[in-house]
């Protein structure tokens, strides 16, 4: 992807500006939905008030989520138009390390956009599932249409930037849901089994590191990590981290 705007590395908001540019280019390519730009804006706000770093609660959730993926029979990483342009290489690496399939699943559906995401991912060596031949009962949005070899039979689904409704349905279908969502108050974060409150551009690279560290562990050791994980505590800490960060900021004025 070639970015139109030149952003000097020295710019204090370099990373944030580059990320925005990637999404704008993704939109021009027909990969990212226009609504995806709004969703990103909401994410950025939460990142700002979290101090734009991976907190301990995020790292704990990322580690336990990777352990859950390594224990899974059919782990699947669900990719939408934002994730496709932000972290394609990283998604491939994480899927390779955890033996997960990659499936395209979008909220704002069109056959054309799914095809565009598919060919975009192919440039990164990703053979994404997108046959959309199965339906998750109980859901009205296009997100219900899934692949019979992927999310339909998955036991663990990693859903970066998920919608609250589908998160709930995936759980009702007995799947373990790992969400990456910067908003700890969203229904997605509240519903997930693993709520990773972190930017997807940091979360997936962190998860790659954990996968490299954990992949040779015995199943029993992975189970211990999963059993000791408490998502409610993680969510609580994420909300309190916002309060603490804001208090610090206020005091420094
Ligand atoms: P919900 O449906 O779960 O109640 P919502 O309707 O507010 O949430 P959606 O538009 O459904 O939000 O999903 C987008 C979510 O993705 C937002 O909660 C936003 O914070 C999050 N998000 C956007 N960009 C990123 C990013 N780069 N990294 C992590 N999270 C992000
Ligand atoms: Mg929503």
Image: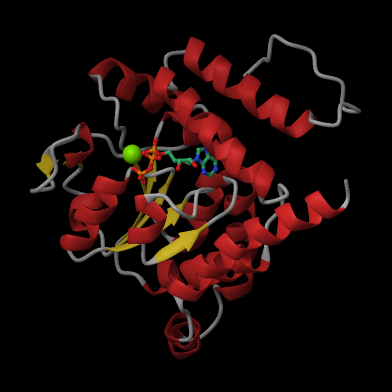
Q: Quadrant of the C terminus?
A: top right
Q: Position of residue 136 (x, y in %)?
A: 13, 47
Q: Which image quadrant is residue 45 in?
A: top right
Q: Residue at x 43, y 29 (%)?
A: 81
Does 129 sit left or right of 158 as displayed? left
Q: Residue at x 79, y 50 (%)?
A: 250
Q: Residue at x 67, y 15 (%)?
A: 2
Does 104 sit left or right of 198 as displayed? left
Quadrant for ligand 1 reads: top left
Q: Position of residue 74 (x, y in %)?
A: 29, 62
Does 6 sit left or right of 4 as displayed? right
Q: Residue at x 58, y 60 (%)?
A: 207
Q: Position of residue 218 (x, y in %)?
A: 49, 86
In this view, 15 is above or below 136: above
In this view, 193 is above or below 52: below
Does 251 sit left or right of 40 as displayed? right
Q: Nearer the viewer, residue 162 or 237?
A: 237
């Amino acid at each position: 992807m070639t970015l139109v705007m030149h952003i000097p590395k020295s710019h204090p908001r370099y990373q944030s500006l580059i990320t925005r540019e990637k999404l704008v280019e993704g939109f021009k390519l027909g990969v990212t939905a226009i609504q995806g730009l709004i969703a990103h804006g909401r994410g950025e706000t939460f990142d700002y008030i979290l101090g734009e770093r991976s907190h301990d609660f995020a790292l704990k959730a990322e580690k336990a989520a990777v352990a859950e993926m390594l224990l899974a029979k059919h782990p699947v990483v669900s990719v939408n138009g934002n994730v496709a342009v932000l972290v394609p290489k990283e998604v491939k690496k994480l899927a390779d390390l955890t033996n997960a399939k990659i499936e395209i699943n979008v909220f704002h559906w069109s056959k054309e956009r799914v095809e565009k995401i598919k060919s975009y991912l192919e440039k990164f060596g990703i053979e994404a599932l997108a046959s959309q031949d199965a339906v998750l009962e109980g859901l009205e949005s296009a997100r219900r249409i899934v692949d019979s070899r992927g999310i339909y039979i998955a036991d663990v689904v990693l859903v970066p930037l998920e919608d609250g409704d589908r998160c709930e349905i995936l759980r009702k279908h007995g799947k373990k849901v790992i969400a990456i969502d910067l908003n700890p108050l969203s229904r997605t974060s509240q519903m997930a089994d693993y709520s990773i409150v972190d930017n997807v551009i940091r979360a997936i690279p962190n998860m790659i590191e954990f996968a490299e560290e954990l992949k040779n562990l015995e199943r029993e050791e992975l189970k211990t990590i999963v059993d000791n994980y408490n998502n409610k505590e993680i969510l609580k800490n994420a909300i309190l981290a916002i309060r603490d960060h804001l208090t610090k900021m206020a005091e420094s004025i």
